[in-house]
Image: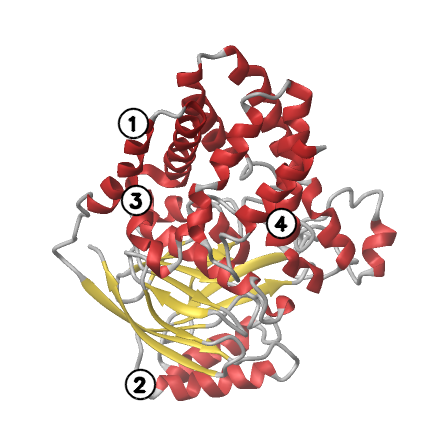
């Protein structure tokens, strides 16, 4: 009973490392506390401990899901928590059989492995990585290590440090405190600095609303933005759905400026009866010069579990269409100026491989079109932005996030927020992105 209560407390404590609380030092403490529980537990008990830890983490950390539906919020832990239970089970099988000095290393390796596993599968929910807890401005020097270690590598180092300190305290050995020098070493590591740079001037449109009148705001704000002659005007996810591609083409031709818009393709358009979530790029003459179809679909928002058997239940929530069709290719689009942008949509900023594939394919700037208005001004917004910060540092690329009601922002390649529009604010964010070669 005590172990179960302590496991729940650990989950609550790690949730506090993320917005809206952002007590990120807890990310260096909680893994060690969980390690203390798992190191001496039998496999079944360890599985229960880790499962309860995951339930508490997701219920508190993602409480903003209640804005969609309370039942969905309560069901949310069903997807990641089995991975936590498996993590506990494996620890319970391995750790008691290892020498005490080897247990922290095994614990940290398993933490990194299972954090990676949480991002796999159709219904993956890879929120709350140890790396993303460090997107707070005061923790950015530590987060820089993801540019060469990746998020699993940073998770390994944080979990190892925390477990070693816990083991040292348990064995009353002072030399274990030397492991605390590791975070200092991460801060002092040199960072590569590109010597040849170019610039891209962008106008990011945030109408501050997502109702039926928002389309008029997009049109008005885009025409106003065109007076400043940016290199690219960007609309958020799904923002152009009320306009057909013919009208969007005419708008780009009127503005004489390239236009990147989010667009939901209805299932009635074309032979495939499934809708798509798209990013479409028009040049200043109104021609479609690039199109990206979202690859990683959001559970319950774009892909519906057990839809064949639960159509009636989904229909009661207004969902009468099939799951979305996912894209197959990276979202690297070339602007008329020759610069290359890597497009991702909404939930995809939680998956390192989406941005990494775009970077590998030559993207100089990463753009995430998102739509978080369903969550109001809850912690979903800063948590989503923090994922974009991690992707910026990970790929050493500036990142733009554009949303109808916020947070619309430009993030530099080192994770600093260059400029942002507040949640709910109506306006145009003019920014200059510094691009690598």
Residue 434 in percent (x, y) is at 24, 64
- The residue beneath circle 4 is 325
Q: Is residue 90 left or right of residue 394?
A: right
Graded by Cα atoms within 10 Å as few (under 14), some (14 to 19) or many (20 or more), the crowding at tag 2 reads: few
N-term mark: 1 or 2: 1
- Image point (41%, 23%), residue name: 105
Q: Nearer the viewer, mark 3 or mark 2?
A: 3
Q: Nearer the viewer, mark 1 or mark 4?
A: 1
Local secondary structure at mark 2: loop
- The residue beneath circle 1 is 175
Q: Coloring scheme of the render?
A: secondary structure
Residue 432 in percent (x, y) is at 27, 72
Outermost residue on the front side: it is 172
Which image quadrant: the N terminus? top right
Residue 340 in percent (x, y) is at 31, 58
Q: Nearer the viewer, mark 1 or mark 2?
A: 1
N-term mark: 4 or 2: 2
User: Which quadrant holds residue 255?
Assistant: bottom left
């Amino acid at each position: 009973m005590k172990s179960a209560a302590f496991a729940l407390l650990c989950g609550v404590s790690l949730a506090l490392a993320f917005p809206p609380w952002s007590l990120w030092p807890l990310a260096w403490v909680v893994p060690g506390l969980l390690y203390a529980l798992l190191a001496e537990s039998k496999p079944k008990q360890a599985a229960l401990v880790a499962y309860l830890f995951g339930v508490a983490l997701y219920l508190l950390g993602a409480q903003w899901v209640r804005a969609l539906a309370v039942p969905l919020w309560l069901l949310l832990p069903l997807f990641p928590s089995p991975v936590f239970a498996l993590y506990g089970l494996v620890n319970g099988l391995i750790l008691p059989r290892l020498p005490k000095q080897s247990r922290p290393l095994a614990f940290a390796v398993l933490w990194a492995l299972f954090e990676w596993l949480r991002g796999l599968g159709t219904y993956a929910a890879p929120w709350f990585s140890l790396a993303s807890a460090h997107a707070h401005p005061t923790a950015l020097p530590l987060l820089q290590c993801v540019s060469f270690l990746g998020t699993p590598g940073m998770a390994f180092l944080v979990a190892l440090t925390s477990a070693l300190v816990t083991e040292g305290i348990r064995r009353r050995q002072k030399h274990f405190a030397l492991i605390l020098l590791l975070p200092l070493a991460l801060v002092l590591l040199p960072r590569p600095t590109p010597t040849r740079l170019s610039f891209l001037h962008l106008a990011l449109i945030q109408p501050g609303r997502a109702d039926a009148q928002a389309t008029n705001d997009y049109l008005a704000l885009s025409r106003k933005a065109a007076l400043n002659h940016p290199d690219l005007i960007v609309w958020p996810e799904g923002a152009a759905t009320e306009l057909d591609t013919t009208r969007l083409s005419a708008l780009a031709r009127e503005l004489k400026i390239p236009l990147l818009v989010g667009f939901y393709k209805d299932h009635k358009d074309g032979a495939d009866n499934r809708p798509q979530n798209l990013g479409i790029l028009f040049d200043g003459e109104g021609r479609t010069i690039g199109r990206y179809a979202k690859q990683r679909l959001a559970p319950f928002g774009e892909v519906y579990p057990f839809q064949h058997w639960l159509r009636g239940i989904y229909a009661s929530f207004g969902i009468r269409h099939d799951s979305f069709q996912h894209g197959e290719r990276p979202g690297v689009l070339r602007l008329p100026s020759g610069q290359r942008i890597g497009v991702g949509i909404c939930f995809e900023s939680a998956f390192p491989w989406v941005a990494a594939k775009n970077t590998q394919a030559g993207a100089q700037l990463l753009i995430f079109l998102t739509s978080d208005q369903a969550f109001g001004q809850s912690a979903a917004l800063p948590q989503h932005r923090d994922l974009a910060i991690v992707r910026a540092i990970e790929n050493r690329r500036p990142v733009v996030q554009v949303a109808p009601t916020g947070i619309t922002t430009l993030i530099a390649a080192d994770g600093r927020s260059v400029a942002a529009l507040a949640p709910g604010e109506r306006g145009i964010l003019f920014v200059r992105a510094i691009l690598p070669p």
